[in-house]
Image: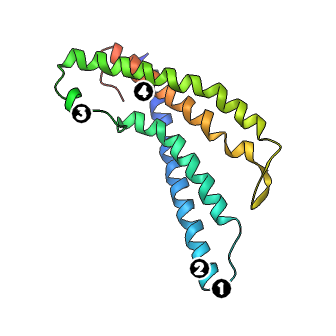
Amino acid sequence: MKKKLQEVCSLMNRVEEGFLIFGLSSMFVAMILQVFCRFVLNAPLTWTEVYARYMYMWVVFIGISYGCRERKHIYVSVVYDRIPGRAKKLLRLVLNMLIMYFFIRQIPWGVKYCQSLMRVRVNGISFLPRGIVYWCLPIGYSTAVIRLVLESVLLFKKEEAI
């Protein structure tokens, strides 16, 4: 069981990190290309700003799961650091459950929202339905839930979470 969890976590780590590196790098390249075309060639591109905006959304929502993995989300460290070991694990478990509850509640809303936008086209990239762009919402929430479930299981098994 432990080996399977570690394999799933390792695969998620590689996919998340690869996507985040690709997303941030491609946003950077798109913006540099836009600056070059606008100020050097005097012929601005129409799609780069739209691409960077929507790629930023994907990076943010996939980054939620990455933040859960690294435990880099906002919390009150003054209180958390003063709690003893077992209570700290219990608090982490309770907080994970609360966060999962919020994310799970958001997934169906995100799916409905994406479906409602499938007939609307993205400005600047006319062939792309806006609903596809907004799939970052349910996908990001889902990956965060998976990450929090894995961490909670490992906390429950008294092993160090990933």
Q: As displayed, is residue 116 above or below residue 133?
A: above
Q: Do the residues labelled 4 and 1 touch (CB within 8 Å)?
A: no
- Spatial CA distance of label 2 from label 4 is 44 Å
The residue wearing badge 4 is 6
Report the residue at 27% width, 32% height from top: 76
Report the residue at 48% width, 42% height from top: 63
The residue wearing badge 3 is 77
Mark 2 or 3: in front is 3
- Spatial CA distance of label 1 from label 3 is 51 Å
Q: Do the residues labelled 2 and 3 touch (CB within 8 Å)?
A: no
Residue 25 appears in the figure: yes
Left or right: where does residue 48 sit relative to residue 92? right
The residue wearing badge 2 is 36
Residue 57: mark: none
Mark 2 or 4: in front is 2
Q: Are marks 1 and 2 in contact (CB under 8 Å)?
A: yes
Q: What element carries label 4?
A: helix
Kind of residue indicated by mark 3: Ser
Pinpoint residue 79: horizontal percent, then vertical percent.
21, 27
Mark 4 or 1: in front is 1
Q: Who comes first in sequence, dot 4 or dot 1?
A: 4
Pinpoint residue 151: horizontal percent, then vertical percent.
39, 24
* Residue nearer the viewer, 14 or 129: 129
The residue wearing badge 1 is 41
Kind of residue indicated by mark 2: Phe
Q: Do the residues labelled 1 and 3 touch (CB within 8 Å)?
A: no
Residue 3 appears in the figure: no
Q: Who comes first in sequence, dot 1 or dot 2?
A: 2
- Spatial CA distance of label 1 from label 2 is 7 Å
